[in-house]
Amino acid sequence: MKWLQNGFELSFRIRPAGLALAALYAVACWATWHLSVDQFFLPAGIRVAALLLTPKRMWPYLILGEYAYFAQMRYPMIEDYGMAWVIVGSACLIPAVALIVHLHHKLMAFTTESWLLSIAASAALVATALKLGLIHMLWPVPPSMPFYTNAMLYVLSDYIAILTVAPLALLWMRRRSHYDWTTWRRHPTLAALALLGVLGALLILVSTQAHSARATLQLLLVLPVIALTCMHGWRGAAVGVPLMNIILSQTMPTTGFPGSFDETTFFTQQIIAITSTALIALGPRITHHYHQHAPAPMTASRASAFSRSAHLANEQDLRERALGLRQIADDIEEALGETVQQLKADGHEAPATDLLRAFSRRSRRFRELTSMVYPTELEHAGLYVALRAGGLSETWNASHRIVRPMLGGDPCQLSMGLQLAAYRTFAEAVSLFLKEETGQIQISARCGRYKGVRGIVLNVALLDRHRTLASRTMERAIDRLSARAHAYSGSVQCRGHRITMVLLDTAGEAERGTLPNERSDICVTPTRQ
């Protein structure tokens, strides 16, 4: 075969970014090793976090980085523990943990964040089994500590370290999810974080000989973490649990060397490990039920945005129809003009005049009806001009029941979508009053700002303040007007003789330019009409 005759070539590409990643990982493991003790081994957490954050194509560089980290640390141990243990013990840990992370890959996408506990427990157990198994197999003299005690220490040490670093990696992985981090500025959250800091400071100040006081303070660290979990779900646990573990590890009595061990703190850590597990498992459940039973602000905002988009799409369709009708009217006028000129040229002056007069009346009415399909005046002169000079105004005047509108503020500061929504809302509300109520009707509007957001308040009321709207009118008003009001984060209220509608321009600039030929720059409206 050709490949046997000519040989074969192995080629692979070395990425500079991969080498940088390997170096960064090795340095991170080396630095955290110096901050670790026997009962809190941070490199185990760095290993899992790096595998979670790094694409699988870059995992070989993480393996290279771990080999470099072990090489500088274990090379001096060759004489004491043998070459076989140094090579095999250094080579098998990260591939085993990488396999665990790989097997959990599907769970990360289709389940809640509690899969992190499965990874932490599996990685701690497998790493401990490999480390202790190879130690007892390859060391010339096995360790003096009983296997069961050593295994419990290693498992707890790795498990706590993973729960300290991996939740922070999970926060980074979910950074693009729709979550409002400004809620962390609220006073209860700040108080819980401050309490964590105060308890940590007290642990530093309390004497290492006061075992009872230290154990009490260490257990009290759980309380603010529980509060953060209740307030912010799994994100609260992902922030609180690492802070609690770091405070606990950095305030326990140590000799300053990696092999330090404190028996009192170890018993506290066992309780903390169980608590951390419960909080991280409970956090996703709190978040899940919160989203299921309490509509989030982000969900309401997206629903309003979808509703606004639907209304604007409908307005765009109506605009195109209105322009098409006007084009037809222009063509008819042009043809009629030619006919009139021909009649006059033939000496039929009177029929031409009568035809022109009759068509002018109908043409004006046609254009009024067309402007009610879509108010093009609104694009060029604003909402108030469209209300006072368009086809809607003519219809109102023909009813002889609408008194002079009271219009204040500058609607040209509002987005075109909001002005159109206000126009439609006004038209629907007045139409409802004309059909369901008797007597004179007063309409008013006021544009302005509310809590830094531009908006408009619309009122349609009976001129007789002593009358009350019929219940049927109120029910129909709520049914017909609420959709547009809610699309603009507003409301509809029926009180006494009036209906009040509020629309807020929460989308603002995002909606500007949605409709063609929007000319808010030349929209001129008096501040008071």
Image (spheres, rainbow, N blue to C red):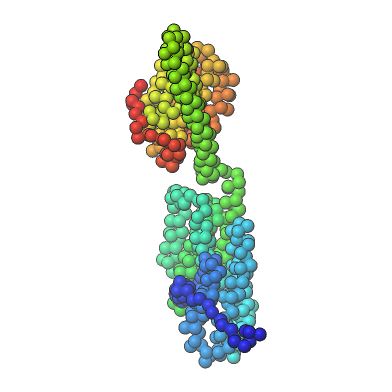
Q: Residue at x 51, y 14 (%)?
A: 467
Left or right of residue 190: residue 127: right
To which quarter of the image does residue 472 belong?
A: top right
| x then y, percent, for residue 288 | 60, 51
In the image, 262 versus 284, the foreground residue is 284
- Residue 49 shows in this picture: no
To which quarter of the image does residue 526 belong?
A: top left
Residue 138, above or below 393:
below
| x then y, percent, for residue 509 | 41, 41
In the image, 412 versus 346, the foreground residue is 346
Residue 329, above or below 209:
above
Q: Residue at x 35, y 21 (%)?
A: 529
For the view shown, which residue lies furthest in the top direction? 350
| x then y, percent, for residue 411 | 39, 30
Q: Residue at x 39, y 30 (%)?
A: 380
How many numbered marks have been drawn onto this rendered protein structure?
Answer: 0
Q: Residue at x 54, y 70 (%)?
A: 57
